[in-house]
Amino acid sequence: MVENVVGAASGPAAADIRSLTWVLVVLGTAVFVVFGALYLRALLRRGDGDQGSGPRLIFWGGLVMPAVVVTVVLGFTLATMRNVPAQAEAGSIVVEVTGHQWWWEVYYPEHDITSANEIHIPVHRQVELRLTSADVVHSFWVPALGGKLDLLPERVNETVLEASDPGVYRGACAEFCGLQHAKMAFQVVAVSESEFQEWVEGSRRPAEQPSTDLTSRGMEVFFDAGCDECHAITGTAADGRVGPDLTHVASRQSIAAGSLDNNTENLTRWVSNPQSLKQGVEMPDMELSEDELGALVAYLETLE
Ligand code: CUA
């Protein structure tokens, strides 16, 4: 099991962006301290009649220093922009990410894999991200791995994702996109090349067929309740595209776009009453009986 990684910069782009951030913080603080001190000095010495140092101060503090600071900042910024790749190397893995209010659709065109709210990548390899939106403007950001980039309707923005260390990295929507913007998170799962290939093989398989009475009943409930109108499960007749693909939903770490851990209790709460957990989502409260709910959740949990 890969560990959750918090805080550290774990991608080449993130390391460069972090260095630039520190340069800006240190320079900004230095300028603030120097001018704060000058301001205080001026306040305390007001009226003592010494006007002689004025022109010199304006020349050094108002002309030379800003020129030096702006030049240094520009230099570091240009260097960072050069180091952070805008386009992936030829032959990179392609992942298409589509923002929805309020979840992330994830598609691997090369393997024809559709997932949601979880992006699996191999470490030490550039991944070409193609970002777009199905509705409003969202923004893709995994702080530990790199910069952020907008997802715009009817347009594809490209960026590069790369992780230097295996781990689970939290990503978030970084552009206010409506009521549940704060609950529009996702995970990037970075694993070794061989584990990634295993994941690809597993994800290409159609869903498990129900093997017990309970899970067969759960599958019936899924169709009777109309879940298939919005959700797809490969290997069944369900091919809705409004909500996340559920073919391998049980293998994902979270549900409701990163807002709940994926376990029986949360899945039950979510399916029965999504509006109480994430008001405004497209998914309605299902109003199932307790038996139906139990069977449906049991079925969903077989979709590894
Ligand atoms: Cu999507 Cu904020």
Image (cartoon, rainbow, N blue to C red):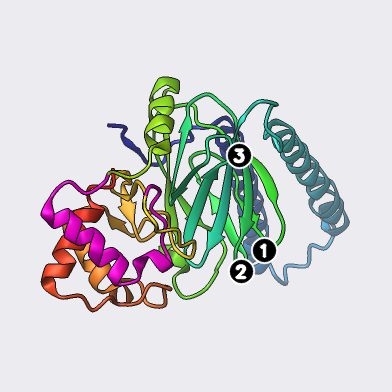
Q: Is residue 295 magenta?
A: no
Q: Which residues are magenta?
A: 209-235
The CA span between labels 3 and 1 is 27 Å
Q: Nearer the viewer, mark 2 or mark 3?
A: 2
Confirm or deny contact between disc 1 and disc 2 (CB under 8 A): yes
The amino acid type, in three-letter code, at marker 2 is Val
Residue 196 vs residue 175: left or right? left
Q: Which numbered dot is residue 49?
A: none
The quadrant of the image that shows the N terminus is top left
Using the image as rendered, state which of residue 291 and residue 284 is in the foreground. Answer: 291
- Residue under label 1: 153
The CA span between labels 1 and 2 is 6 Å
- Residue under label 2: 136
The amino acid type, in three-letter code, at marker 3 is Ile
| Residue 302 seen anywhere in this rendered image of the structure | yes
Q: Is mark 2 within 8 Å of ligand 1?
A: yes
